[in-house]
């Protein structure tokens, strides 16, 4: 296994120099347990946060890398922000509950948590040298932004690697945050072109000064989401379950790096719900070993991530890129909002909440509707999902879809057609309720990426079959928290 699971300091000199730099800069690291339960954060740090802008490159913003940020992204809420979608929108009796991720600091997306979980364990064990190494963040958009944000705050040089076809909003953010334009590496293709990202990282890895923090294989991504996102979603469910009679039936999330899916392992353990992985039907890798291109930005595909706990996944649900593209327009165009208000009776509050929904978030919602219909869920059933980022990251897509799909005109008739096709008309096609053989097939598919291409040992690859392996990973949370506490003491 990687030295990421070291339980002591690997290089005391590197760690000591990092602590000295943190002492000079006044940086303190939050524990994972504090991010999971932000009410336990030192009141002194919380008081100091009141004067810090949530998008500033300020070390105190590390204590906002959690799901409990308030409406202004500054204060804390007891329950993470969430949306309960009305039946008038979803057409199903089940309650579809969406945790909102655009309240996270710096990048307004939850991937900043994954980045923290991947870099900090290396830092506090002396495995990352702030003076001589660069953190390389391969991504399809939000993870590399999160990585650049965390690296900047910690004083590390970083490199963002992402496809050139991703949304302009991602690149504009990166251009503001990176120290050098050369620290943004644009690879060929778009959302589905992960192999090209890996190839670029192989070239960078030839220089020992580049440390590749691959979210698709970094167990810190899994651990952070299971520990922090999992508990946040459990708290959301408990807040919704006011009468104690609701049942958490499923957690639905796009596959992506599979970090977010790790929250499902927590929810299955705690609430007994099932887990559904979502992918684009244009690239049905999990459904039938397929390939292709699509525009559901941020979910990645064409391979099975190393950190995907395949044998604990219950469903795979395909969603066409046409659904989030079209619904993004319905939710944000004045004619679409008027239709939802005047013809579907949605409140202004509900319509206003759609600003929290980016493309992958909408795909998650469509998949949740499909699963609720497939299982014929009722009003006492809850399907949990996440909005990983908000609509602000995809404003550039509105005009593209408007011109390409609607001839530049989006009116009440267009809105009715979109609602009818992509909400009222949601079908239970492109779905798979996984059998043991299905899980074997999906698990085995990962062999070709990780063992043959990426050099993971067969032993390390195979041990991922057992749930005990994944449960055992969570023993690292108190270990890392202890190392963070020691590091903070050394940097004080």
Image (cartoon, rainbow, N blue to C red):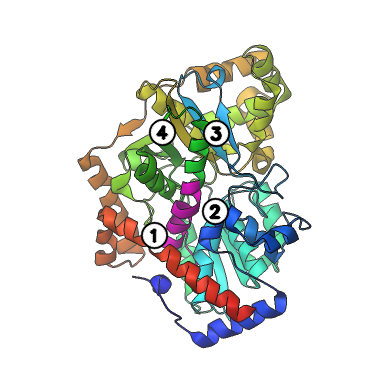
What SS does tag 3 mark?
Answer: helix
Instruction: Look at mark 3 in the image and give the residue it sits on.
Output: 362
Q: How far apart are marks 1 and 4 (CA)?
A: 22 Å
- Image position of 87 with respect to 15: above or below: above
Q: How far apart are marks 3 and 2 (CA)?
A: 27 Å
Instruction: Look at mark 1 in the image and give the residue it sits on.
Output: 474
What SS does tag 2 mark?
Answer: loop
Instruction: Look at mark 4 in the image and give the residue it sits on.
Output: 248
Q: Mark 3 or 1 closer to N-term?
A: 3
Quadrant of the drawing holding the N terminus: bottom left
Q: Mark 2 or 1 closer to N-term?
A: 2
From the image, state whether disc 4 or disc 3 is nearer to you.
Answer: 4
Left or right? Give the position of 377 relative to 389: left
Left or right? Give the position of 306 relative to 342: left
Q: Which residue is drawn at 55% across and 62% down?
A: 116
The segment highlighted magenta reads: 212-231
Q: Mark 1 or 4 closer to N-term?
A: 4
What SS does tag 4 mark?
Answer: strand
Instruction: Look at mark 2 in the image and give the residue it sits on.
Output: 37
């Amino acid at each position: 296994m990687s030295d990421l699971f070291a339980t002591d300091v690997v290089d005391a000199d590197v760690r000591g120099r990092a602590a000295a730099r943190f002492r000079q800069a006044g940086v303190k690291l939050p524990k994972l347990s504090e991010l999971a339960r932000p009410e336990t954060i030192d009141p002194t740090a919380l008081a100091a946060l009141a004067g810090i802008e949530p998008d500033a490159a300020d070390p105190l913003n590390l204590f906002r890398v959690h799901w409990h940020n308030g409406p202004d992204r500054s204060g804390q809420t007891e329950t993470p922000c969430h949306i309960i979608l009305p039946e008038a929108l979803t057409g199903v009796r089940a309650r579809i509950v969406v945790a909102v991720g655009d309240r996270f600091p710096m990048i307004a997306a939850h991937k900043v948590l994954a980045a923290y979980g991947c870099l900090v364990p290396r830092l506090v064990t002396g495995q990352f040298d702030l003076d001589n190494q660069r953190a390389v963040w391969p991504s399809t958009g939000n993870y590399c932004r999160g990585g650049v944000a965390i690296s900047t705050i910690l004083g590390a040089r970083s490199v963002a690697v992402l496809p050139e076809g991703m949304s302009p909003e991602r690149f504009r953010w990166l251009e503001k945050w990176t120290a050098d334009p050369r620290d943004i590496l644009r690879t060929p293709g778009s959302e589905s072109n992960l192999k090209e990202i890996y190839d670029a990282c192989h070239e960078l890895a030839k220089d020992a000064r580049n440390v590749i923090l691959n979210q698709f294989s970094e167990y810190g991504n899994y651990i952070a989401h299971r520990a922090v996102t999992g508990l946040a979603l459990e708290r959301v469910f408990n807040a919704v379950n006011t009468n104690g009679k609701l049942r958490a039936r499923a957690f639905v999330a796009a596959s992506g790096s599979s970090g977010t899916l790790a929250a499902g392992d927590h929810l299955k353990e705690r609430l007994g719900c099932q887990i559904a992985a979502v992918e684009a039907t244009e690239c049905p890798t999990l459904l039938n070993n397929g390939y292709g291109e699509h525009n559901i930005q941020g979910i990645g595909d064409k391979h099975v991530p190393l950190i995907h706990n395949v044998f604990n996944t219950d469903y795979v649900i395909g969603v066409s890129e046409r659904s989030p593209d079209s619904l993004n327009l319905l939710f944000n165009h004045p004619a679409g909002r008027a239709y939802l208000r005047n013809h579907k009776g949605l409140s202004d509050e509900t319509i206003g909440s759609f600003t929290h929904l980016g493309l992958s978030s909408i795909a998650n919602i469509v998949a949740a509707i499909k699963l609720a219909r497939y299982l014929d869920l009722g009003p006492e059933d809850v399907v949990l999902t996440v909005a990983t980022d908000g609509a602000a990251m995809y404003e550039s897509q509105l005009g593209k879809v408007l011109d390409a799909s609607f001839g530049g005109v989006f009116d009440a008739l267009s809105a009715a057609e979109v609602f009818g096709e992509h909400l009222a008309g949601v079908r239970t096609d492109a779905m798979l309720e996984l059998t043991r053989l299905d899980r074997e097939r999906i698990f085995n598919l990962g062999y070709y990426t990780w063992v043959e291409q990426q050099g993971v040992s067969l032993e390390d690859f195979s041990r991922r079959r057992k749930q005990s392996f994944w449960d055992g990973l969570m023993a690292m949370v108190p270990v890392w928290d202890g190392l963070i506490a020691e590091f903070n003491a050394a940097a004080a």
